[in-house]
Structures are given as structure tokens and as C-alpha cells.
Image (cartoon, rainbow, N blue to C red):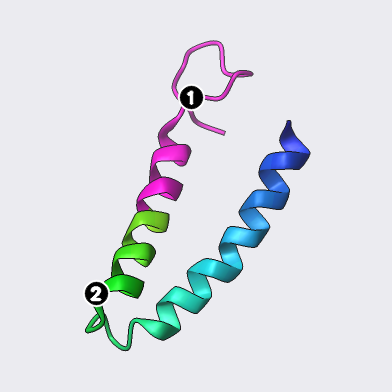
């Protein structure tokens, strides 16, 4: 499962960079919305607790 998440994250990194370039300073709505969605997903995944964390703090 970890490898799958790593591969998908690598692909989304390229999508994130392309959306950032295509947003032209956040003036174009579709690429900007895609960029905000990906950043929101990354923040949401970061806030998830780690299965190895017995205290459920999510800290590494």
C-alpha cells in the first residue's frame, strides 16, 4: 500500500506543478481550482493519524 501511495503522490506532484503554471497567478479558474484541490488533499492527508502512532497525534 505504501508503494501505491508513493507512486500516486509522484504523479500528483507533476499535476500540481502543471496546474500551478497554468493558473497564471491564480487568474484562470480551472487550473486554480485543481491546484487548490490538490493542496487541500495533501493537507488533509498530512493531518491523518499514522497507523504506527499509538497516541493518534499524527506526529512523525
Q: In the picture provided, is 17 more to the left or to the right than 51?
A: left
Considering the numbered disc 2 on the image, is that residue within a helix, a strand or a loop? Answer: helix
- The image shows residue 11 at horizontal and vertical percentages of 65, 60
- Residue at x 72% of width, y 51% of height: 7
Q: Residue furthest front?
A: 30
Q: Are marks 1 and 2 in contact (CB under 8 Å)?
A: no
The magenta region covers 40-60
- The image shows residue 57 at horizontal and vertical percentages of 44, 22
In which quadrant is the C terminus drawn? top right
C-alpha separation, residue under disc 1 versus residue under disc 2: 32 Å
Q: Is residue 58 above or below residue 6?
A: above
Q: Quadrant of residue 28?
A: bottom left
Q: Quadrant of residue 38?
A: bottom left
Identify the residue under disc 1: 49
Q: Choose between 46 and 40: the one closer to the eye.
A: 40
Label located before the other in sequence (1 or 2):
2
- Residue at x 38% of width, y 66% of height: 35
Q: Residue furthest right?
A: 3
Q: Choose between 60 and 19: the one closer to the eye.
A: 19
Q: Is residue 39 above or below residue 28?
A: above
Considering the numbered disc 1 on the image, is that residue within a helix, a strand or a loop? Answer: loop
Main secondary structure found in the magenta portion? loop
Identify the residue under disc 2: 29
Q: In the picture provided, is 9 more to the left or to the right than 16?
A: right
Q: In the picture provided, is 33 more to the left or to the right than 50?
A: left
Q: Choose between 44 and 60: the one closer to the eye.
A: 44
**Residue 45 lies in the magenta stretch:** yes
Q: Is residue 50 above or below residue 43?
A: above
Amino acid at each position: 500500500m505504501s508503494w501505491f501511495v508513493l507512486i500516486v503522490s509522484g504523479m500528483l506532484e507533476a499535476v500540481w506543478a502543471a496546474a500551478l503554471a497554468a493558473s497564471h497567478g491564480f487568474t484562470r479558474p480551472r487550473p486554480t481550482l485543481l491546484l487548490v484541490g490538490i493542496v487541500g488533499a495533501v493537507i488533509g492527508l498530512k493531518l491523518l493519524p499514522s497507523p504506527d502512532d499509538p497516541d493518534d497525534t499524527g506526529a512523525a
